[in-house]
Amino acid sequence: MNMNNSNESLATLIRARLERPICLIGLMGTGKTRLGRLLAEAFSLPFFDSDEEIEKAAGMDISEIFERFGESYFRDGETRVLRRLLDGPLCVLATGGGAVMTPETGEAVWKKTISLWIKADLPVMLERTGRTDRRPLLKNGNPEEILRTLMEKRYPVYSKADIMIESHGGPVEVMLNKALRGLHGFLYKEAAP
Ligand code: S3P
């Protein structure tokens, strides 16, 4: 994607101070993977998506892992994949919505990364997750109720993130700009008057 000049200058300033991976967290359907790819491109860094890495390691997609082996098996794989990625080279990392709920992963994310929480409106998450059937957790009941329950349970944990940006479902460029401004504010806050 071609960035405008102000995003480009923000990206340069951020990259100059970036010493830890950027880790995107948030519920399903908030756009972590899409935004993560754009941020990685903006900083010329590698991008990883924990779900994709788990699928590669298991040779199966997430739904099949849940179906055949259950959620706790998936969480074990997720913990291992994130342990590896968080000890790897500087990158942008999108995590599955439940990843930071595992204490080991949560602690590593808060300590070793710059964490960015994408907090999206419920209708945005519903619309996005409704487009595919790749979210096993939303298959066993009413997706709206399930997401509401997850919001209650997970938001107190997500709120530990270094940066929070809101998504109201607009174009991804808007999210990119919000993320860049958030990262810049976080990395340069000591320079504020
Ligand atoms: C999950 C979110 C999914 C995936 C798995 C479980 C969760 O990732 O890891 O289906 O617990 O919220 P996305 O957040 O990328 O959809």
Image: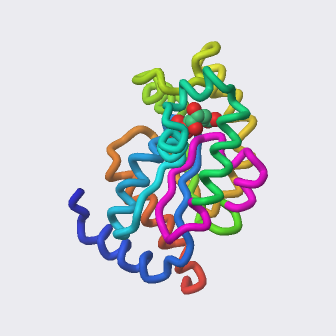
13 left or right of 24 in image: left
The number of callouts visible is 0
Report the front residue among 7 and 15: 15
Q: Position of residue 104 (x, y in %)?
A: 76, 54
Q: Position of residue 183 (x, y in %)?
A: 50, 68
Where residue 191 sits, quadrant-wise, is: bottom right
Q: Position of residue 164 (x, y in %)?
A: 58, 55
111 left or right of 94 in image: right
Where 1 falls versus 133 (above or below)? below
Q: Position of residue 90 (x, y in %)?
A: 50, 71
Report the front residue among 178 and 99: 99
Residue 59 highlighted magenta (yes or no): no
Q: Residue at x 64, y 13 (%)?
A: 141
**In this view of the protein, can residue 120 be seen by the observer?**
no
Q: Residue at x 54, y 78 (%)?
A: 19
Range shown magenta = 85-108
Residue 104 highlighted magenta (yes or no): yes
Q: Which corner quadrant holds the N terminus? A: bottom left
Q: Residue at x 36, y 41 (%)?
A: 170
Where 9 falls versus 150 (above or below)? below
Residue furthest out toward the top: 141
Question: Quarter for ligand 1?
Answer: top right
Report the front residue among 170 and 87: 87
**In this view of the protein, can residue 39 be seen by the observer?**
yes
